[in-house]
Amino acid sequence: MISGDIGGLPGPFQKHEIEREMKRTLTRRLRRCAVAFLLGGALTSGAHAAGGYFVLGYGPYAHQSAGASTATGFDAFAGSSNPGKLAAAGTRLDLGMLTFLPSRRMTRTGSGTAFDFKTKSRNDVFLIPDGAYAHHLNDIWAWGITFYGNGGLNTEYHETTGIPGSNNNPSRCGNKPGNYFGGCGELGFDLLQIIVAPTLSYRPIERHTFGIAPLLAYQQFRVYGLQAFEALSREPDRVTNKGVEGATGAGVRFGWLGTIWPWMNVGATYATRVHMQDFKEYRGLLAGGSFDIPDNFSVGVAVTKQEMTLALDIQRIFFGHIPALANGVLNTLEAPEEKPLGSRDGSGFHWTHQTNYRVGLTWAATPNLDVRAGFAYGRVPQADSTINTASFAVLAPTPALNLTAGFSFRPSGTDEIHFAYGAYRRGEYSGDSAVFPGATEKVEPRVDTIYLAWSRRW
């Protein structure tokens, strides 16, 4: 039995103990900063109010009405809201551009270290296009296609501690200063989802229309600066700095629109989970290696009296069905051997199902001008404010309120011009730091949106 040193080098037993102690030390260091990251900060999910990382609404009428569009808003975007509405759109083309203007500032104070900071994401202007076409065949059938996106934003933090050797993975980073998650170099996240929805609607009886829209999805993901978390992953070489990777997937949306009385429409829609391909290059980071789009449903009613239409929507998004979203932050930290990063039970966002409420009001001011306004509210999808969730809420808050206003102007009998402004509010969050005991972290997000669109009717 060999238990001593040979030639001044540790024996097998001592080497084993040294390796175990090094692993314990690294795990303790990672635990300090991992809670602040997990799956981090800025997968655009924190950008959208009352819908997690889903865009509030799709198409010109929904953008003006805070997304209240299940039983009203008869543009060509039925494939993204309610396929049952398609027949009511007639034959038309809608093309739009959403300008997203987020301002995200984070502050940490009271740690007494170089990791006290105030920083602002450098990316604060994003353009998200969308488009749709609807074709009315006859009184029974209509078809169309919708193109829209979720996400499309990213967060980029360039600051470091400025202290050489302060990173938490010297084997990868050498003597570089640590960034705010303990890795090195620039820190950033980017998620983009694009969905194409060919749509078909069928009216079997008067006043009731049903529709179906296959959801053909493409998403791309990129993350960098997370070298500190490689030791907690089942595949350490597939966690960070792997460039942009894409994945495809598919699901389906069903919808119904009914005219109960001449002055009242009722609608309902359900979208299945969109199953996405696994990310090969980031399968050591995301729980289960993939990022599926959750199933969701909405119901709505629209009541019209003279020139006014009031729309009410309730939406439910099942974020808790997706491991990468639902798993707790502490999963890997408490059981790194059994639940490493990238495994199905690995750490995630700790999101739960979310219910959103939306109200939209349309006023037909003149034969050529419609004015709209909307209000949306949805509790944040984070499951709670404990250490199992809270640091994510600091880094990527989801504002609870959204206010919109806009108009649609028809300069001719065939063309329509649309404008909408949106404001995301009540997203400020502060709390005790899970990274540095005794410190306080605060985030102050403000998001404004401007949407411009053009429509042609035939």
Image (cartoon, grey):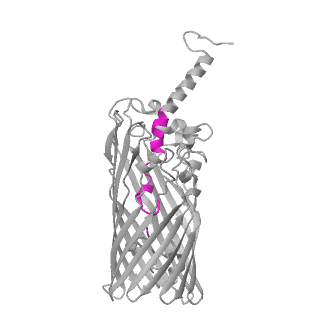
Asked whether the viewer can see residue 72, the reply is yes
Where's the N terminus, which quadrant? Answer: top right
Where's the C terminus, which quadrant? Answer: bottom left
Residue 395: x, y in percent? 41, 48
Residue 406: x, y in percent? 33, 75
Relative depth, front residue between 322 and 124: 322
Q: Is residue 120 left or right of residue 319?
A: left
Q: Is residue 430 above or below residue 195?
A: above
Q: Quadrant of residue 64?
A: bottom left
Which residue is located at x 55 percent, y 53 percent?
326
| Residue 45 is one of the magenta-drawn residues | yes
Relative depth, front residue between 261 and 457: 261
Which region shows up in magenta?
29-57
Residue 230: x, y in percent? 51, 38
Residue 416: x, y in percent? 35, 81
Q: Residue furthest top?
A: 7
Relative depth, front residue between 268 and 341: 268
| Residue 407 is one of the magenta-drawn residues | no
- Total residue callouts: 0
Which residue is located at x 46 percent, y 80 percent?
72
Q: Quadrant of residue 272?
A: bottom right
Q: Is residue 71 left or right of residue 186?
A: right
Asked whether the viewer can see residue 101, the reply is no
Q: Is residue 292 left or right of residue 438?
A: right
